[in-house]
Image (cartoon, rainbow, N blue to C red):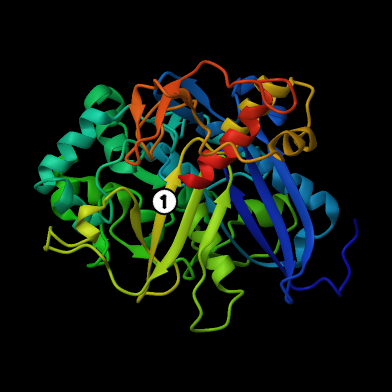
Amino acid sequence: MAATSECAPLFLGLDLSTQQLKGVLLNQHSSIVYEMGIVFDDEFPEFKTCNGRHVNGDTVTAPVLMWVAAIDLLMSRLKATGLAPYICGISGAAQQHGSVYWRQQGVETNKQLDPRVSLRQQFDSAFAVLESPIWEDSSTSEQCQNLEQSAGGACELARITGSTAFERFTGPQIAKIKETQPHVWSQVSRISLVSSFVASLLIGDIAPIDCSDASGTNLYDIQCGRWSQELCDSIDPHLVQLLGERVVMANEVVGQLSSYYTERYNMRQCPVVAFTGDNPSAFAGFESMFAAGRSAAVVSLGTSDTVLFPLEQYPYSLNTSSVAMQHLDGHVLRHPTDRNLYIAMLCYKNGSLARDWVREHSLGSASTWADFSNAADTEPMAPRAFGFYYLSTEILPRAKGIYRFEQHKNGSIVCPNGTRYQPVTVFSTSNQGDSHWSDARAIIESQFMS
């Protein structure tokens, strides 16, 4: 694909998600010029990931060097299009909560990259932790309890950081590494979130974390707009310095594109704008489509499913009897680009992968999403029956397993209206004559109810 002067200027947006690194080129009219994707399982079989990660019980990680290699591969394919020289600005997003642990050697290597050598080769010894904990991890229950205790209770932690302690959040993950791998912790020089990690690779220096992604750490004082010294000190007295004291808005320029990319991929030196989390990024993007003064609620269906909506006032306070303080299941994040707004978020871990599991187990591995849609396009299951599919420990509610229930006059589970349900292994025969067909409809209903 050859570029012409009509393409200039172009802007590159990157998204390092759970399963792939995606890139999109936009022109000055916000029209898509080119899209590309690097699917981790397909492109890097040597890392032996499944859907972009390694799962060992409740511990879920991703190889940081796989992410590094993906940046190089995407840039090489971008160069082959002939469009790279027209890029005038770069920004992006990444999966929330995940963390990257730099050695000092890696920090220095990043500042003096050799354009003749791949990133993966140069960063081979750059990281103290090679398997980065990611958002699907739920192995930090003990650290969550400790963090809430340090804050003075779950309500106080939510008042400060926007959330009670959640296993996937960065703070508990950092605490776990320090407690269980002291020899590794002693090598840590800086800590990035996945979003600021990508920006760091691009500018050749450690990029600051943005305020919205910082809100997903259980360490950031949302109202004060800075790291909570007390909470950080409860994990390590140097943690604020490891994270970087400066926290930025997601529309701030954090540096210029490193000479590694200008020389290796024929790109021009251009500004790199702070990266943020994928969820606040999606919200800000959709919000920009609406006229000023109008609000929008965003439902995002991905590896995780999320619901996001704007808040003009911070809902959590010292009044523990308030409605907001009585319902702490969700999260409050700083708005990525507006200092005066916040975002409320509900997150469900078992999203697209759970739907994919139902499709394969109900309809067969050769089935398509069209088959799934046909199977789900039946009469409603509720209130006759319900199905819940939590392949990994769910966030809302905190549960794990496959659960199916049907109405039964002798059922042991009684709803407030007196309707009785009994657990079943499979649903009763549906209209299609195959009980498994009902799972496609059931997962759609239960996920929307959640």
Residue 240 left/right relative to 78: left
Relative to 310, is 445 above or below? above
x 34%, y 36%: residue: 418
Q: Work out whether residue 234 or residue 313 is closer to the camera in this orientation and state it.
A: 313
Would you identify the image quadrant in which residue 351 lies?
top right
**Up/down of 240 relative to 364, above or below:** below
Q: Residue furthest bottom?
A: 292
According to the image, label 1 marks what residue?
346
| Residue drawn 83% across the image and 49% down it | 80
Residue 304 seen in this snapshot: no
Image x and y of residue 145, in percent: 18, 35
Residue 319 in view here: yes
Residue in the picture at 35% in, 26% down: 413
Q: Say what amino acid the circle numbered 1 marks.
A: Leu
Q: Which image quarter is the C terminus in? A: top left
Asked whether, in this view, residue 195 is left or right of residue 399, the answer is right
Total numbered badges shown on the rendered structure: 1
Q: Nearer the viewer, residue 449 or 378?
A: 378
Q: Residues within 10 Å of mark 1 (few under 14, many from 20)?
A: some
Image position, residue 60 (x, y; %):
44, 27
- Residue under the image location 21 percent in, 28 percent down: 142
* Displayed quadrant of residue 366: top right
182 on left or right of 80 = left
Q: Is residue 109 above or below residue 290?
A: above
Q: Secondary structure at mark 1?
A: strand
Q: Quadrant of the N terminus?
A: bottom right
Q: Position of residue 52 (x, y in %)?
A: 59, 31
Report the residue that reaches farthest toward the front.
Answer: 409
